[in-house]
Image (cartoon, helix red, strand yellow):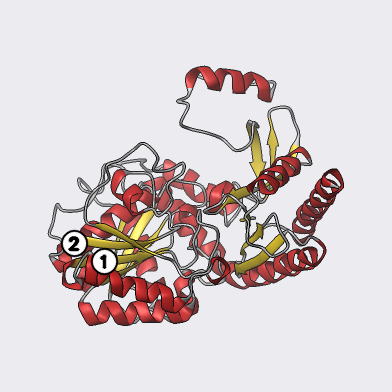
Amino acid sequence: MEYRTMTTNAELLSRRVQAVARGVSSIHPIAAAHAENAELWDVEGKRYIDFAGGIAVLNTGHRHPQVMAAVEAQLRHYTHTCFQVMSYEPYVALAERLNALAPGRGPNKTLLLTTGAEAVENAVKIARFHTKRSAVIAFSGGFHGRTMLALGLTGKVPAYKTGFGPFPGEIYHAPFPNPLHGVSVEQSLGALETLFKVDVEPERVAAIIIEPVQGEGGFYIAPPEFLKRLRQLCDQHGIVLIADEIQTGAARTGKFFAIEHSGVVPDLITVAKSLAGGFPLSAVVGRAEVMDSVGPGGLGGTYAGSPPACAAALAVLDVIERDGLLERSLRLGETIQARLKKLADQVTRIGDVRGLGAMVAMEFFQDEAHRVPDPELTKALVTRAAERSLILLPCGMYGNVVRILVPLTASDALVDEGLTIIEQCLESLRQVSR
């Protein structure tokens, strides 16, 4: 059965309202027709520059030729066996490569899954089984997925957690170090110590999970000294340290895993999104001693490690290496940050421009002292940019951050075109507000 081809965005939106659950929202009222690399076209033929990358899924761009060829080749052999029924080489080969890419000396082992939330849930399962403990500590502003355990770990209520409780027990939150919003490294570490005194003894904590760069929370970068202190704390108390690299992994920050920038070696790493270049795949990668603590039959999933997705991921790793995308990410991030910082000198409501590699954000405030967040300006910029053919994403605890996740394969000319649109939109918004 073929789906009915749309002729207008409005027509599809009308059908969507009738057919799709209201809780599944979309930022832009646009229906995609086709896409290539860092560009896409809607059903009305309008072209857009994609600075969203499917929320960090398309580091290698839309429909990378090498990725598409790998999937097409796999489809000629088999699409599914369920790895727990009959194993296959793409799963094993991908696990071998991820084990080699993980920081630390190893040995490492890998579990393949389907979604980021699934990876997070399994990482916690493994940590609990390994330590024979139950409690987990996460951080304010962190986002770890939409399933119930992952949602419990998420440190942001609206709109993710509102009305969905109660959440699983034995989950605790500490403040993420964020100097821009008044939380120092020492204050965050002090809060952890307080947590150990008033809520949960460290001997009952199975894992601490943290994003090296917060994604939905606002692209705040975990200070290296904080990650090092976390590692020491976990070593002291026998706690498993989990790096959630769902949004930061697969070369986005200039390293394959963002935590590599700090020199810290976590016990477990979760990765998804750009791992398979647009195909659903996730993984937990970690120390063999921890990964192997779970016995046969304790891990898996019907679609976990789908053969076409594994083939896509192997091609993605080849592209990252062959095309130098780690170096490209660093150069791209420098270019984007330089342009946005120059813009911030002119637009005083931009309170901060930050990034690690090509994971870049700017944060808006209502006042020049940068104390009152400005989600309205953020929303207006995202809307105005789309009108001018640029797809942007908001994020942040206060909804006042615009993030840039342009494919690493985008040309310099295309990135320049997108940044120019941002500048033009902010200038037009300034004119309106005067």
The foreground one among 349 and 29 is: 349
Q: Give the percent coordinates (x, y) of residue 212.
A: 46, 68
The circle drawn on residue 368 is none
Q: Which residue is mark 1?
A: 207
The image quadrant of residue 11 is top right
Tag 2 and tag 1, C-beta contact below 8 Å: yes
User: Residue at 60% across / 18% down in the picture?
Assistant: 14
Q: How many marks?
A: 2
User: Residue at 62% across / 65% down in the picture?
Assistant: 358
The foreground one among 5 and 76 is: 5
The foreground one among 407 and 67 is: 407
Q: Give the percent coordinates (x, y) of residue 257.
A: 46, 69
Q: Secondary structure at mark 1?
A: strand
Q: Which residue is mark 2?
A: 128
Q: Give the percent coordinates (x, y) of residue 344.
A: 76, 64
Q: Give the percent coordinates (x, y) of residue 432.
A: 84, 43
